[in-house]
Image: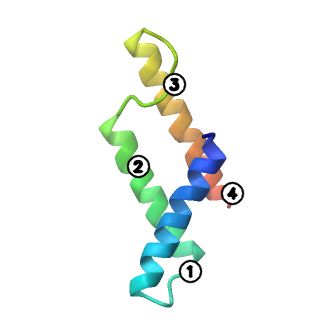
């Protein structure tokens, strides 16, 4: 999954979930929720991306991926 697909899926998840409880939820609110979630992921610094055996490289690749996701969310 690339950064744009991840961003779209994250926004869709929030749009669907919040619409179940609040019929007035819109894309702006879903994007804000996605950005908050993304920030929490970045702060926890999980290593889920990267093809290197070097831990530092994997961390850098993960941070770069989530930075790309953040940019894609802002574009949508």
The local secondary structure at tag 3 comes to helix
Place of residue 70 in the rendered image (x, y in percent of width and height, measured from the top left): 56, 48
Q: Which residue occupies the extreme right position in the image?
A: 75
Residue at which label 3 appears: 61
Left or right: 2, with 62 as reference point: right
The local secondary structure at tag 2 comes to helix
**What is the distance, in whole Å, between disc 1 and disc 4 at their CAs?**
16 Å
Mark 3 vs mark 2: in front: 3
**What is the distance, in whole Å, between disc 2 and disc 4 at their CAs?**
17 Å
Q: Residues within 10 Å of mark 1 (few under 14, many from 20)?
A: some
Name the N-terminal-most of marks 2 and 1. 1
Q: Give yes or no for contact between labels 1 and 4 (Cβ–Cβ under 8 Å).
A: no
Residue at which label 4 appears: 75
Q: Which residue occupies the extreme bottom position in the image?
A: 23
Q: Is residue 64 above or below residue 7?
A: above
Q: Is residue 58 above or below residue 2?
A: above
Q: Residue at left 51%, top 90%?
A: 24
Splitting the image into 4 quarters, where does residue 73 fall? bottom right
Name the N-terminal-most of marks 3 and 1. 1
Q: Is residue 30 above or below residue 54?
A: below
Residue at which label 2 appears: 39
**What is the distance, in whole Å, between disc 3 and disc 2 at their CAs?**
16 Å
């Amino acid at each position: 999954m690339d950064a744009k697909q991840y961003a779209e899926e994250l926004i869709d998840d929030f749009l669907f979930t919040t619409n179940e409880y609040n019929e007035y939820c819109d894309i702006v609110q879903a994007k804000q929720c996605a950005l908050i979630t993304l920030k929490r992921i970045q702060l926890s610094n999980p290593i889920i991306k990267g093809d290197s055996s070097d831990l530092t490289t994997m961390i850098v690749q993960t941070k770069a991926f989530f930075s790309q996701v953040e940019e894609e969310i802002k574009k949508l």
